[in-house]
Image (cartoon, helix red, strand yellow):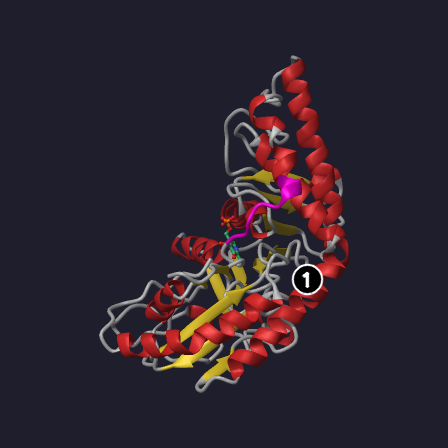
């Protein structure tokens, strides 16, 4: 492989931005105090954490005391769902979520189902979108929580969160949204959206890995799920990842400051990519044509497997991602694509996700389009022999 490598897997994770990196550095080796300590090293670290909290809060229209730092999107989702279920169990045991959630929500809700909660898995249309009318019909007297993601990680579709949260509010049901793919990429305002709980993860918007936040509205008395030293006002024990939260705040503040410019740039790159890829035989766009993340282009190719396609692209110097719609018995096809009716369990078809950031260039997009046909050809021949695919898409 001699050609320049192109990173087009930004929905999986992003490079840490210069501003985030620089902001974090002092908190590893200079100002490395424990923010719970009362001496000067501790108070300096605490100031940094509180400044980070303020920046994260401002970035999503929240109040400072509505932001709780966590170890990332997975923990935030688990906390929101498990704690909300516990909080409201006297009212009922019915939970509503969508069929296209990330596993961090899907598997957590499934755990509750195993513990005796009843779950309604809302269907989606062919674009992967939930309908507010169907949510309205699904709400019951004993519904305690609705969790629907802001943006889908496989196909980029944006959900009508404001309408969904309005329905939840009218029925006095808690509303959680996993905004892990959306934060830093599209404008988010928790008050305007009317959500009670929102999950964020720093590494999806050029912050570091292993750090995130849960927005908990002041009207929601969410109990903890982690117990210990009583950090985060007793709600989330564990020594705060000081460099992590500082990096997260710097990255999010920067992303919000440059949002308009970035959305314009990345949308233009994405549309150039979509246009080029759709010229290839057998390619179809997945996800909503308009209501989608600015940087996410997702496709399906018939008679090709996702694993071989990603491998062939990697060999050609393009880092992309694929869930997989492999044939029955050879593994589990993408739950999201099945829910949207894009594939059946019997289909052999490769989903391809190319996710861009502001660091990508028009030249890179043209290169991806140039390198793709050979990779597809190679993957199609290898797909006949290939075994099961790995299905998970972050
Ligand atoms: C929609 C969505 N939710 C949750 C997560 C999990 O976030 P984290 O990697 O921070 O645990 C991811 C990413 O993998 C995601 O895309």
What range is drawn magenta here? 13-20
Q: Is residue 351 above or below residue 394?
A: below
Secondary element type, mark 1? helix
Residue 42 visible, this orientation: yes
Residue 384 locus on image (x, y percent): 25, 78
The residue under the point 29% across, 77% down is 327
| Residue 382, image x, y percentages | 27, 74
**Left or right, residue 35 beside residue 319:** right
Front residue of 312/251: it is 312
Q: How many marks?
A: 1
Q: Residue furthest bottom?
A: 281
Name the quadrant of the N terminus.
bottom left
**Depth order, front residue of 39/282:** 282
* Left or right: 165 as drawn, with respect to 376: right
Residue 122 appears anywhere in the view: no
| Residue 351 in picture, x, y percent from top left | 43, 73
Kindly identify the residue that appears in the image at 52 percent across and 40 percent down: 71
């Amino acid at each position: 492989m001699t050609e320049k490598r192109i990173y087009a897997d930004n929905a999986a994770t992003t490079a840490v931005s210069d501003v985030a990196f620089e902001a974090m550095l002092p908190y590893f080796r200079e100002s490395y105090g424990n923010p719970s300590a009362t001496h000067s090293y501790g108070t300096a670290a605490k100031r940094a954490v509180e400044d980070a909290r303020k920046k994260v809060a401002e970035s999503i229209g929240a109040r400072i005391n509505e932001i709780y730092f966590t170890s990332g999107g997975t923990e935030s989702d688990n906390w929101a769902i498990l704690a909300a279920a516990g909080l409201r169990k006297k009212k009922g045991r019915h939970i509503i979520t969508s069929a296209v959630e990330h596993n961090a929500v899907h598997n957590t809700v499934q755990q509750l189902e195993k513990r005796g909660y009843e779950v309604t898995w809302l269907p989606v249309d062919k674009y992967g979108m939930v309908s507010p009318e169907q949510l309205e019909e699904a709400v019951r007297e004993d519904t305690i929580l609705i969790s629907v993601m802001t943006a889908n990680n496989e196909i980029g579709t944006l959900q009508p969160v404001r309408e969904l949260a309005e329905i939840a509010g009218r029925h006095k049901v808690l509303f959680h949204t996993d905004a892990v793919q959306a934060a830093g990429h599209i404008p988010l305002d928790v008050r305007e959206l009317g959500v009670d709980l929102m999950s964020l993860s720093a590494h999806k918007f050029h912050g570091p890995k292993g750090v995130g936040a849960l927005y908990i509205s002041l009207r929601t008395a969410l109990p903890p799920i982690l117990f210990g030293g009583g950090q985060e006002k007793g709600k989330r024990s564990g020594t705060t990842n000081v460099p992590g939260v500082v990096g997260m705040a710097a990255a999010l503040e920067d992303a919000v400051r440059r949002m308009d410019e970035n959305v314009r740039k990345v949308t233009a790159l994405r549309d150039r990519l979509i246009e080029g890829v759709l010229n290839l035989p057998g390619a179809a766009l997945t996800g909503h044509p308009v209501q989608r993340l600015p940087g996410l282009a997702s496709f399906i190719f018939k008679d090709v497997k996702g694993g071989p396609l990603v491998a062939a692209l990697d060999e050609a110097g393009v880092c992309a991602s694929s869930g997989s719609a492999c044939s029955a018995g050879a593994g589990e096809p993408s739950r999201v694509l099945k829910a949207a009716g894009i594939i059946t369990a019997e289909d052999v078809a490769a989903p391809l996700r190319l996710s861009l950031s502001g660091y990508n260039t028009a030249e890179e997009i043209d290169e991806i389009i140039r390198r793709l046909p050979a990779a597809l050809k190679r993957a199609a021949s290898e797909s006949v022999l290939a075994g099961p695919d790995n299905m998970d898409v972050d």
